[in-house]
Image (tube, helix red, strand yellow):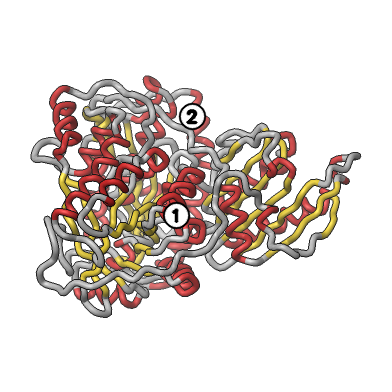
Amino acid sequence: MAAVVAGRWDQVLPDLPAPLAAALDQVLDGGLHSLFQPIVDLDTDRVVAYEALARGPEGPLAAPDAMFAAARAAGRLAELDGACRAAAFRGAVDQGLLAPTTVFVNVEPEVLDTAPLADLLAIAGSAPGELRVVLEVTERALASRPAELLRTVERVRRLGWAIALDDVGADPMSLSFMPLLRPDVVKLDLRLVQGRPGAAVARMMNAVNAYAESTGALVLAEGIETPAHLEAALSLGAVLGQGWFFGRPAAGRAADRPAGELVLPAPQAGTPVDGTDSPFGCLPGGTRLRRSPKSLLVELSKQLEREAVGVGETCVVAATFQEARHVTPSTERRYAELAAATGFVCAVGEGLDAEPLPGIRGATLAPSDPVRDEWDVVVLGPHFAAALLARDLGSTGPDADRQFEYALTYDRATVVEAARALLSRIAPRPTVPAPVTLPATDPAIPQPRTPASEHRAHLAELAGTDPATGLPGRVRTQEVLDVAAWNARTGGDVLAVLTVDLTGVGVVAERFGELAADDVLRAAVHRLGRRLRHGDVLGRLGATRFAVGVPGLAPATAAREAARIADGLADALGTPFVVAGEQLVLGVRVGSALCPDDADDVAGLLGIAAGGGGGVRR
């Protein structure tokens, strides 16, 4: 997929510098073209599809990340996104990539609900033959804009297109979002193919293969560059492959392999998501309903919440509270624990906002919404599904004695439909303003902090999951590193622990606001993640300090490997951030320590790394 800078930019931003503005005009005025990378059936070695990859004209916006950063800064991201797909369709037609060949195209999560799909369908419809399209989305899009994505996916299917879920394995949430999106193709993140097997990979493949077996979805492995990668892809259950081993992106068809046809699974049945259906309404006809006071429902809800904590970071939790006044201090504590322990938590109720509690997505309910009269708790994981679905009978008296009719179901299909009904109401993630250019800063100069940023930093330290970046917070990061250190001590290999300190973020917070600083941090986290392997640890220790754990290093080469990783992380963060078409440079220092060589406990390792062990400064 085309690389983009993290963040959302929904408002019109300051003008780009004249050269970049002219280059962007050229891109959007027919300057785009597409290259096509082959996708191969691993059983037959036939090319059955191509992924369209956008490229700009020669100049400052030739690379996809530069193009998208400039378009986002100019408030023209949706325009560029549509132009990329239009260029993909034109290129596919020009190169004769028509049925039975299939073309995979990407869609930016930020513009999913405004993408000009009707115009693009007209382009496809006017082609001299049938154009088969698979639209790629990511779980990040569902986490950011669940209602829009679910509706857009249904609209795409009505157009006759199929859906691929991209980067599966890069984030545990993708495993639980699979049944909600119902993808026809599951694309494994390249780190699964190129990395080493481990417990996390095994858990992910159990979930992917279970989904594929139950739905007929196809598993596609990205990043196949060597025969060893191909062997790994096959062992992971992939039936399709993509990567330089089969061919680099090119202007047209692959000449070295025969062509074949991509046979997609039959469309899955499901209730249309239009924001009017309700979880209780998803119960099958004839379901036996029981009556209960609210006090029992509360206890049943707590039990499901405990089940969700047991499922962990691959779990989606969705709940209704009727009204905001029912969210008590006790409820807040329980849901803070849920947000720390699970992958995605959302709650709706009259009077709730887009983020009713830190790390929890939400939405208010209109008094006429049927969900307003329900008490629902839905827990969905790769191998666990349960839902408490209840409807208020309108009785009077003490709140704890109010009567409901309810059903407790473990039927996976019903639970999935109930979850979709609730996610179809969740508001988009709150928008953040664009950071403005920050001059290069000296890491040695202390950066200013504000009372608000100090408070947010403290919350980040204590939280299981940091709401600003989505990373594990300090306590949870140390817990994960504790396990990794124990494995290193008992397993004979070496764990590298690195600390990454940024300077300059405080200036952003003071001058442009906390949300702008959060956006810079998200972009930094995106860069760090791209330099790490699947299974490496990345967490937030404080306001501008991050921890990285790299397990499984060979003792003979661990020090050299840790130094290489430190250099890579420093380089990733030391290069300018393209913001509003200008340059943003942060100061960065990376320190490292080895377990058990330097210390055998996490506190000691972090202290050595933060104190300058193996330091790299940019």
Q: Residue shown at 89%/39% (left/top)?
A: 396
Give 564 or 80, whichever is nearer the viewer: 80
In the displayed structure, does residue 573 sit left or right of residue 595? Answer: left
Q: Which residue sits at x=30%, y=40%? A: 5
Screen quadrant of the C terminus: top left
Per the image, the residue denoted by label 2 is: 454
In the rendered view, tell whether residue 226 sits above or below residue 536.
below
Residue under label 1 = 602
Picture residue at 28% right of the left edge, 57% below the top: 104
Instruction: State the residue lying farthest toward the bottom.
Output: 43
In the rendered structure, the answer to whether residue 197 lies left or right of residue 326 reads left
Label 1: which secondary element: helix
Give x and y (percent) for residue 506: 38, 27
| Residue 375 point in image, percent of width and height | 73, 48
Amino acid type at image mark 2: Glu
**Disc on the earlier residue, 2 or 1:** 2
Q: Residue flagged by tag 1: what amino acid is it?
A: Val
- Within 10 Å of disc 2 (Cα), the crowding (few <14, some 14-19, many 20+) is few
Asked which quadrant contains residue 224, the reply is bottom left
**Residue 472, percent from left and from top:** 47, 49
Q: CA distance from mark 2 to mark 1?
A: 24 Å
